[in-house]
Image (spheres, rainbow, N blue to C red):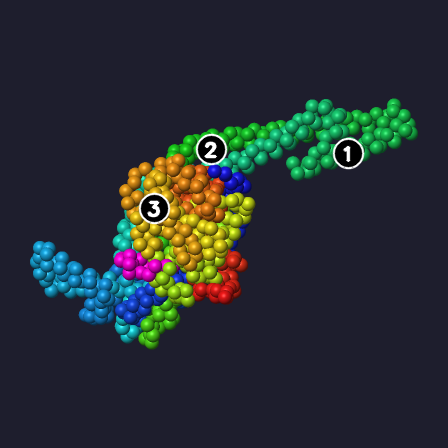
């Protein structure tokens, strides 16, 4: 047979959209609208559950009070303290919050308010869940071995513990921002009880603060008193040890100093004076001695005698006389000459005066020498005394070190005693201070409305949760969407031509083959009621009976595609195939053949599905002979064929006994089949063959050489995309001959939900007037 050369096509093209592009909002909106029913159901279910919760939940009332923690409340009774850092303030606030949450304070509140006797608190109304838990616990207690009965004290203690636990669960304590205010709130089923518990909590906390301060100061006072007694005794012992050591070592003088140290100080003072005297005497002696060493004449002329050193009146008189004689002698020498007797006499007188002055100087120098010797002797004596006293002072210094150690210990104990004494006095005063460093700034009032459950918030949350759950389920359903829904799916995932949608029809097959009327017996004016079951046999004539329906229009588009592909051919063989059974290929083949035949084209439709001849089941009566008999040349095809009177369609059926054949593929590819097809090509213009599904059997693959083109039928929303792609991959000969794909059993009411905005599927309502489900009027 001549082969039709189809143009090459890409069976699995890549996605046309860029993977890095932004999210397609149109597709998201389409998916949301498509799953709107699921989302609405989830929202309704969530709202219903929230309503049931609100109906069964026990209302609770919350009372709140505010407590201010302020160190300045006791500023008039205590000494001013340094400003506290932010870290210390945070630690103090955190400690106060934990104290309010503590079990000890809860037990104190229970004792103060006798809340263990309050049945509303100890045994509150139970919810349905709590009732179920109670029944289960009762059953378990009946089965488990019994315990000895509790005493009254144990029962009271248990009630107190339970009441305290309930209070801790109902209590909420939190710091308000960065302030020093703590908000304390209590929740209970009774508003009066909530307010009472909150007030009792605030009062108990203030009392606890006072008691804590009193206990702390009392314990500190007792400890300080013990320490003071001990320190006083030790300080007295240390002072007595110092005095005893001083007395034993003789280390005390009337002025409160060491005797050796006092003596050494006095001797040092005297030594300094003696050294000064020696220096002064030595200077005078050396001065006069140097004058004497110059000789008599020179000593008289150069001697400088200070009036501070001695009474030198004699020397002054002698020096004046020498000056006067010298002046007279010079006058005589100038007038009479040096040999004049008066000049000689004056010279002798001058010499006598000089000798007197020299002798006077010698006497003074000897006197100064005696003074120097006395001063030096005194200095040496003082040095010897100092050396002797310094030796004694060294021994005293060694003893002084131990004395200082004893004195330091005594001073330290005395200072420590004074410090502890001051603390003791302060603690004694604070012990009776009735001021707490906290106060209530907002008293708890009786709540007028329940705080939980919050109806508006609960309903809003249920709506939000319902939306989230619905969106999650919708997303899961969308991710699980693996089927063909629109023409875009066919073109993108298969790369093939899309031929159209065939609407879903409700088939009704009669159990008795004679019960349903034959196609030829259906009245011409009968219409296809929407949603009503259609006879299984009548389904092969839908396109003929309703030529202006969308069903017929899709098959007409298929016929046009085949005409374009097979243009100029004398006889074309068209195979109708599908991947899986039940996709409606037999109905498509019958209606396509009927539509082509009704147009005046000589058409033969062959039921070649030997395993499950669906086309033959549509006939009014079971055929006696069929395709197998024709291929095996047991009977001519004219004897086996049947003709529809209205559409003039020739049908070559398959007998039911052919279902027992095991080698159907060999029969379809046999020489008898080739001879049969060759023999009828002059009789018919179009041969449509209803072939078996591609996945279960290989009959269609065996018959492929005789087919000019395939029409692929896929069930809308049922056939997996992967299955079709796998078949097309494994059967490239069939894929290359496939004219197009038809989506059968389409839910037209849901189709627009899967189409993108602006797609033809969304515009179905605008052209629905072009379709008419009733029969077209025949021209006269």
The location of residue 754, given as percent across then percent down, is 45, 57
Discs 2/3, front: 3
Dot 3, how many residues are within 10 Å of its Cα: few (below 14), some (14-19), or many (20+)? many
Residue at 31% in and 71% down? 61
Q: Is residue 341 left or right of residue 519?
A: right
- Magenta span contains residue 317: no
C-alpha gap between disc 2 and disc 3: 158 Å
Q: Foreground residue, 96 or 9?
A: 9
The location of residue 32, given as percent across then percent down, is 44, 59
Residue at 33% in and 76% down? 448
Which one is earlier in the sequence, the residue at label 3 or at label 1? Answer: 1
Whether residue 571 is visible to the viewer of this picture, yes or no, is: yes
Which one is earlier in the sequence, the residue at label 2 or at label 1? Answer: 1
Q: Foreground residue, 19 or 205?
A: 19
Discs 2/1, front: 2
Q: Does residue 550 sit above or below 732 in this rendering?
A: below
C-alpha gap between disc 2 and disc 1: 52 Å
Q: Does residue 46 sit above or below 487 in this rendering?
A: below
Q: Foreground residue, 612 or 744?
A: 612
Q: Which residue is mark 2?
A: 386
- Magenta span contains residue 509: yes
Q: Which residue is mark 3?
A: 626
Q: Write down the region rendered in magenta.
A: 503-519
Location of residue 42 by image quarter: bottom left
């Amino acid at each position: 047979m001549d082969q039709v050369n189809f143009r090459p096509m890409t069976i699995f093209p890549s996605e046309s959209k860029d993977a890095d592009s932004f999210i397609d909002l149109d597709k998201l909106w389409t998916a949301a609208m498509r799953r709107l029913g699921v989302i609405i159901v989830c929202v309704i279910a969530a709202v219903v559950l929230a309503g049931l919760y609100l109906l069964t939940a026990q209302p609770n009332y919350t009372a709140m009070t505010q407590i201010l923690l302020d160190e300045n409340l006791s500023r008039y009774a205590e000494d001013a303290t340094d400003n506290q850092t932010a870290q210390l303030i945070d630690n103090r606030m955190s400690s106060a919050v934990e104290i309010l949450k503590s079990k000890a304070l809860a037990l104190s509140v229970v004792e103060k308010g006798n809340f263990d006797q309050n049945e509303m608190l100890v045994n509150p109304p139970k919810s349905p869940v709590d009732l179920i838990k109670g029944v289960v616990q009762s059953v378990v207690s009946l089965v488990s071995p019994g315990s000895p009965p509790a005493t009254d004290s144990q029962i009271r203690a248990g009630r107190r513990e339970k009441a305290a636990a309930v209070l801790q669960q109902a209590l909420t304590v939190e710091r308000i921002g960065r302030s020093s205010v703590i908000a304390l709130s209590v929740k209970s089923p009774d508003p009066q009880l909530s307010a009472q518990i909150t007030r009792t909590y605030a009062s108990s906390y203030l009392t606890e603060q006072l008691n804590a301060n009193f206990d702390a100061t009392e314990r500190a006072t007792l400890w300080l008193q013990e320490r003071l007694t001990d320190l006083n005794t030790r300080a007295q012992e240390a002072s007595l040890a110092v005095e005893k050591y001083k007395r034993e070592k003789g280390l005390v003088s009337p002025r409160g100093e060491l005797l050796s140290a006092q003596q050494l100080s006095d001797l040092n003072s005297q030594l300094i004076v003696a050294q000064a005297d020696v220096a002064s005497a030595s200077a005078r002696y050396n001065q006069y001695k140097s004058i004497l060493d110059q000789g008599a004449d020179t000593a008289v002329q150069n001697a400088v005698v200070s009036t501070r050193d001695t009474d030198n009146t004699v020397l002054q008189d002698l020096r004046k006389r020498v000056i006067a004689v010298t002046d007279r002698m010079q006058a005589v020498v100038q007038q009479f000459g040096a040999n004049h007797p008066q000049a000689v006499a004056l010279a002798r007188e001058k010499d006598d005066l000089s000798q007197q002055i020299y002798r006077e100087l010698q006497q003074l120098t000897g006197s100064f020498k005696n003074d120097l010797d006395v001063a030096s002797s005194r200095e040496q004596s003082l040095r010897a005394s100092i050396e002797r006293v310094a030796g004694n002072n060294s021994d005293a210094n060694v003893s002084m070190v131990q004395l200082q150690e004893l004195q330091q210990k005594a001073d330290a104990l005395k200072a420590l005693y004074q410090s502890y004494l001051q603390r003791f006095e302060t603690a004694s005063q604070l012990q009776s201070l009735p001021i707490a460093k906290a106060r209530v700034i907002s008293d708890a009032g009786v709540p007028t409305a329940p705080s939980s459950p919050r109806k508006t918030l609960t309903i809003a949350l249920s709506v939000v949760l319902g939306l989230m759950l619905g969106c999650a389920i919708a997303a899961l359903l969308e991710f699980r969407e693996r089927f063909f829904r629109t023409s875009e799916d066919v073109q993108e995932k298969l790369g093939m031509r899309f031929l159209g949608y065939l609407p879903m029809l409700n088939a009704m097959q009669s159990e008795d083959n004679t019960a349903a009327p034959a196609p030829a017996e259906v009245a011409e004016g009968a219409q296809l009621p929407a949603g009503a079951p259609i006879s299984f046999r009548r389904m092969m004539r839908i396109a003929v009976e309703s030529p202006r329906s969308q069903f017929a229009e899709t098959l007409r588009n298929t016929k046009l595609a085949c005409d374009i592909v097979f243009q100029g051919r004398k006889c074309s063989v068209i195979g109708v195939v599908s991947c899986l059974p039940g996709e409606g290929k037999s109905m498509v083949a019958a209606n396509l053949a009927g539509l082509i035949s009704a147009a005046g084209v000589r058409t033969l439709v062959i039921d070649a599905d030997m395993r499950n001849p669906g086309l033959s089941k549509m006939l009014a009566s079971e055929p006696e002979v069929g395709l197998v008999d024709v291929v095996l040349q047991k009977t001519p095809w004219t004897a086996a064929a049947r003709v529809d009177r209205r559409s003039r369609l020739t049908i070559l059926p398959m007998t039911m006994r052919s279902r027992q054949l095991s080698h159907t593929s060999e029969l379809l590819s046999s020489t008898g089949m080739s001879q049969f097809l060759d023999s009828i090509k002059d009789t018919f213009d179009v041969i449509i063959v209803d072939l078996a599904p591609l996945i279960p059997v290989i009959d269609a693959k065996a018959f492929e050489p005789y087919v000019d083109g395939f029409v692929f039928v896929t069930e809308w929303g049922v056939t997996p995309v992967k299955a079709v792609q796998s078949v097309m991959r494994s059967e490239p000969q069939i894929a290359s001959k496939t004219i197009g794909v038809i989506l059968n059993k389409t839910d037209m009411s849901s189709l627009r939900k899967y189409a993108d905005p602006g797609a033809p599927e969304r515009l179905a309502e605008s052209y629905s007037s072009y379709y008419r489900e009733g029969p077209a009027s025949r021209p006269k």
